[in-house]
Image (cartoon, rainbow, N blue to C red):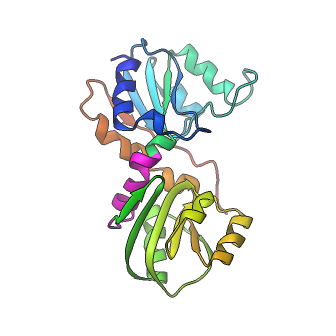
Amino acid sequence: MTVGEIYGILDELSPFELQEAWDNSGLLLGSERDEVSRIVLSVDIDLQMIEEAEEHTLFILHHPLIFSGLKRLVWSEYPANLLRIMIQKSHTMIAMHTNFDQTHLNRYVFETVLGFDVAGCEGFVCTAKGDWHTETLLKRVKERLGLDTMRIVGTKERIHSIALTTGAGASLMDSIDADLFLTGDIKFHDAMKALSKRLMMADIGHFESEKFFADAMAPHLKNLPIPVIIAQSINPFTYI
């Protein structure tokens, strides 16, 4: 298959035009005419992944490796150090970021991973309604996301509505109409604002909430005539 053929499938699945203006999803390395021998799905890409991949591998990533404008390509610096090897091995790369968040990933995590019955999905936000004891609910979220600890903003004895945005979604809090907002990368001033709004928030981690990207994507590519491999992305953080 060619990169262009696969790009067309991805664009039909989750249109690239849906990405946010600041995003950089789409074809980031290679040509639509390039032949692809296999696909690797991953949240991010690292040196070991590149070194182990065969030539003519297409990486479909959640996070764009090339995100902000590149001003220089110095081979000892990130991300040029990775791009150099990828070019040498005729690798290609497509990012499915904020477009896939809206069409698939948030719902997949909310429904399939956390097991909530979705009441609505609008943009980046999925919601559910019910009646949960807060401590029991938070324990369930931690277990299903594999979290040892979780930062909490505010307290409530019972939860009747939940909202979720994977990754870093605290900037959306003004649009949230729920008792509890699950998202990652909650900053100090986000927390202070949430307290003033009486919005309870739980920081579920950026990587931890998006690590299911490959699992959400893989079923849509299962009928391709080339292998599709799920790679284990590396969390850059360690916890002590």
Task: Give the extent of the magenta segment.
Answer: 101-117
Residue 86 location in percent, x, y? Answer: 56, 21
Q: Tell whether position 112 is magenta.
A: yes
Residue that appears at 47% across and 26% down: 53
The one nearer the camera, 38 or 190, is 190
The one nearer the camera, 135 or 68, is 68
Residue that appears at 44% across and 81% down: 136
Say which quadrant the N terminus sits in: top left
Residue that appears at 60% across and 65% down: 174
Tell me if residue 54 comes above or below residue 213 in the rendering: above
Judged left or right of residue 113, residue 203 is right
Q: Tell whether position 43 is magenta.
A: no
Q: Principal SS element in the magenta part? A: helix
In this orientation, does residue 235 appear? yes
Say which quadrant the C terminus sits in: bottom right
Residue 181 location in percent, x, y? Answer: 53, 68
Residue that appears at 44% across and 48% down: 102
Judged left or right of residue 177, residue 4 is left
In this orientation, does residue 109 appear? no
Tell me if residue 127 comes above or below residue 63 in the rendering: below
Tell me if residue 91 comes above or below residue 60 in the rendering: above
- Counting the numbered discs, the total is 0
The one nearer the camera, 36 or 128, is 128
Judged left or right of residue 146, residue 14 is left
Residue 126 found in image quarter: bottom left
Residue 202 location in percent, x, y? Answer: 57, 70
Residue 4 location in percent, x, y? Answer: 39, 19
